[in-house]
Amino acid sequence: MTNLEVWKGIDLLLEAAALARSPVRLEIYGTGSQRDSLERQARELGVDTRFHGFVADLRKPLAGLDVLVQPSRADNFPLAVLEAMAAGLPIVGARVGGIPELVLDGETGLLVEPEDAAALAAALDSLAESRERREALGRRARERVAESFSVDAFIRRTIELYEELCGSST
């Protein structure tokens, strides 16, 4: 689901999991140059973490998760966030790049400042404490994807733009 590179902030996620009051189990999907150092960091911190490598079809892994965390230092338009939202998962994401355009803070997930492992841990704890809140955020995330990012929404906006530019309506 992610590139295991510095800019994705997985090291921050591991720090946050170690700081969290609630037990956290991380399922990390993806490949990259940081995998060995991230595995070492997880062991050193004692964080329950499984590294799965690349997965072509994310539907099954997403179905087994409670939350998708995107702690990126930079991220233009993370497709993993949209896929997780479409699967009905709440998102915990860093307030960088395109993440705040996808995730509505407090409505479809929680946004935290980048590079803030303590804030990330607090967000994880707040969602761990309430299944109802996770489910409500996940439902709204699924609705948001359908309303704003689906093929139907794209077609609707394209037609609206075309009509506006042409000065006509159907």
Image (tube, helix red, strand yellow):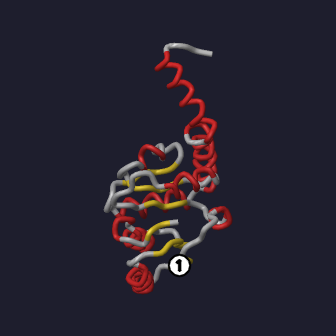
Q: Residue furthest front?
A: 166
Q: Identify the residue at horizontal 37%, vertical 66% (top origin).
A: 9
Image-quadrant location for residue 17: bottom left
Q: Is residue 119 above or below residue 136?
A: below
Q: Is residue 30 visible?
A: yes
Where's residue 97, x and y in %? Answer: 36, 50
Q: Position of residue 16 (x, y in %)?
A: 41, 68
> Residue 99 versus residue 126: which sits nearer the camera?
99
Instruction: Classify 10 Å Cα crowding around label 1: few (below 14), some (14-19), many (20 and above).
Output: some
Q: Nearer the viewer, residue 46 or 29?
A: 29
Please provide percent x and percent y for residue 44: 40, 86
Q: Which residue is mark 1?
A: 51
Name above or below for residue 96 compared with residue 42.
above
The residue furthest left is 115
Residue sitting farthest toward the top: 168
| Residue at the image position 35 percent from the left and 52 percent from the top | 96
Say which amino acid is labelled 1: Phe
Q: Tell me if 14 is positioned left or right of 116 in this view.
A: right
Residue 25 visible in the current orientation: no
Percent x, y for residue 91?
51, 54
* Residue plotted at (62% across, 46% down): 142
Q: Is residue 44 left or right of residue 132?
A: left
Residue at image x 39%, y 78%? 33
Q: In the structure shown, which secondary structural element does the residue marked by tag 1 occupy?
A: strand
User: Could you say which quadrant of the image residue 140 lies in?
Assistant: top right
Q: Is residue 76 left or right of residue 64?
A: left
